[in-house]
Image: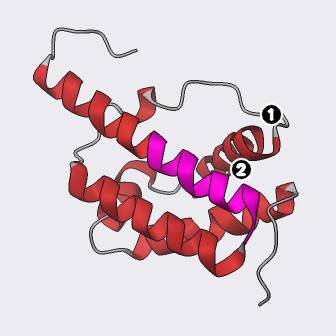
């Protein structure tokens, strides 16, 4: 498959679908994703399409707070490092160009922020999750 720019919702779907196929079967990430999402993968993927469509294509179809559902996950830096590794690998397999680079940068920053916030709430359980 020839790599191309991320330009449409169909491109977002390729990225999200292939990435989560890897994550679902990954020895480290799979048990967490499958344990939380269970049989709601179609619904979860739909949210992710809208999230990345909003972030990368600036087509504002996602509404919500992405951190809150992740706040109580039993994850550590190791999980975020693996998530980023698989995400970047997937981007590089299918896409090239400015949006692909932006996707990898944004994913890395999101993982860093989520990890930081999860650790903060683990160490400060009396603080409300925002």
Q: Residue 78, percent across and down?
A: 22, 58
Q: Residue 56, percent across and down?
A: 74, 46
Q: Residue 80, percent across and down?
A: 33, 53
Colour treatment of the image: secondary structure
Residue ID at (81%, 31%): 60
The dominant secondary structure in magenta is helix
State the SS at label 1: loop
Task: Read off the magenta span.
Answer: 96-109
- Residue 8 is left or right of residue 119, and the answer is right
Q: CA distance from mark 1 to mark 2?
A: 9 Å
Q: Which residue is mark 2?
A: 49
- Residue 45 is left or right of residue 74, and the answer is right
Q: Nearer the viewer, residue 14 or 116?
A: 116
State the SS at label 2: helix
Residue 116 occupies quadrant: top left
Residue ID at (71%, 50%): 49
Contact flag, marks 1 and 2 (Cβ < 8 Å)? no
User: Looking at the image, which residue sits at the far bottom?
Assistant: 1
Q: Which residue is mark 1?
A: 61
Compare marks 1 and 2 and give the one earlier in the sequence.
2
The local crowd at label 2, few if under 14, some if 14 to 19, many if 20 or more residues have their Cα within 10 Å, is many
- Residue 54 is left or right of residue 43, and the answer is right
In which quadrant is the C terminus drawn? top left
Residue 54 occupies quadrant: top right
Q: Residue 66, percent across and down?
A: 53, 32
């Amino acid at each position: 498959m020839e790599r191309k720019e991320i330009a449409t919702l169909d491109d977002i779907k390729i990225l999200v679908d292939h990435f989560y196929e890897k994550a679902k079967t990954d020895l480290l990430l799979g048990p967490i994703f499958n344990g939380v999402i269970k049989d709601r993968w179609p619904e979860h993927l739909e949210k992710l399409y809208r999230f990345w469509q909003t972030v990368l294509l600036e087509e504002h179809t996602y509404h919500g707070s992405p951190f809150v559902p992740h706040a109580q996950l039993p994850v550590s830096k190791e999980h975020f490092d693996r998530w980023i590794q698989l995400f970047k690998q997937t981007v590089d397999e299918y896409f090239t160009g400015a949006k692909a680079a932006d996707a990898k940068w944004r994913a890395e920053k999101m993982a860093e922020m989520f990890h930081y916030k999860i650790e903060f709430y683990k160490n400060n359980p009396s603080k409300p999750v925002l």
